[in-house]
Image: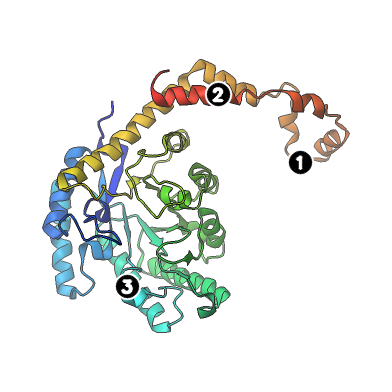
Amino acid sequence: MYTPRPEDRFTFGMWTYSNPGRDPFGDPVRPLPDVDFHIQAAHKLASLGAYGVNLHDNDLVPIDATPAQRDAIVQRYRAGLADAGMVVPMATTNLFSHPVFKDGAFTAADPRVRAFALQKAMLGIDLGVALGAETYVFWGGREGAEVDAGKDLVDSVKRYRDAFNFLIAYVKDLGYRVRFALEAKPNEPRGHIFLPTTGAMLGFIQTLDDPDMVGVNPEVAHETMAGLNFPHAVAQAIDAGKLFHIDLNDQESGRFDQDLRFGSVNLKMAFFLVKLLEDEGYSGPRHFDAHAYRTEDRNGVWDFCAGCMRSYLIFKDKVARFNADAEIQALIAALGADPEGLNALSAYSPANRNALRSRVFDIEAIGAEGRGLERLDQLTVEVILGVR
């Protein structure tokens, strides 16, 4: 029941399984990857039941590679992927690691940096499309500021918009079949990152030249860092028709970006996130943007990958049990019961307007009624813990 299969559409970023365990206070504890390792990793992930691998441009091709070197690497990797039976559903561009991006990429004050960022993004899109990616993610890790005096904030938003409008036109001009997904984060590595939440991204998307081809890629850790409710953000994206991709991991609120194994910290959050995705029929990849603990060698990395997928499937099973539980569903139905037919008045019309204006509500009686949420929450916990 909990064995992953390709049809589950579980994917991992190259940067996840190849994370060397470096942190701000310690050197790498695992070897740095090369192309051969990425090919071996594709086979290993396939044997674990994964569907695909996602990548930044420089996860595969060094930033200083010549065009000939790039083509040779891509050819080798594409052949390795095909042999492993794996795909690349999503790709992205690293616009944050190199020193040139220390003060931003698309929003940098320096026009040379903005121009190079566009060039790098175009080449990254080319690479992603060549490997079969249908979604291209943009995370603005350096698009922000510690010193607000160093940037005109309104101009920064305009530059962001100009960059995406340029890349939208680029994709259309070349006939690429790819959509963009924007990923929000409140801080780190910048002290403050522009468009810090999924809601901010959804608002920004509507200002673009072609909002229909741009959605969001929300990440568990990024919303949780700010103390926000991640399933709420995902629900808003689903309601807007903008959940193009999703990054699954786990995170303790108020910490640095931990990228923990999915389901390893916030069990209730993970349960309701899986419930939301499954109940709403989300058909995109379930992408794990996380990494193994620094304590692990490469064998531990594969335990981490297997654990992410297994935990998702366990929560999926718990969701099915929750949805089939007669007492739970009766409690939920009672919460929304409408014996007086008031739901029919929610669509505006002159008749509904007049009916609502003249309606007498016994708000004291309504306010005194219990809602039964204690019982419902306890039953939910019991389902998650496996005792119901």
Locate residue 92, reporting x and y percent: 33, 61
Q: Nearer the viewer, mark 3 or mark 1?
A: 3
Q: Is 14 left or right of 268, judged from the image as shown? A: left
Locate residue 265, reporting x and y percent: 38, 39
Residue in the image at 48% along x and 59% along y:
186
Q: Nearer the viewer, mark 3 or mark 2?
A: 2
Secondary structure beneath dot 1 equals loop
What residue is disc 2 on? 376
Quarter of the N terminus within the rendering: top left
Considering only order in the chain, which callout, 1 or 3, is on the residue closer to the N terminus?
A: 3
Considering only order in the chain, which callout, 2 or 3, is on the residue closer to the N terminus?
A: 3
What residue is disc 1 on? 348
Quarter of the C terminus within the rendering: top left
Secondary structure beneath dot 2 equals helix
Q: Which image quadrant for residue 332?
A: top right
What residue is disc 3 on? 120
Q: Which image quadrant for residue 3?
A: top left
Against 236, residue 307 (above or below) is above
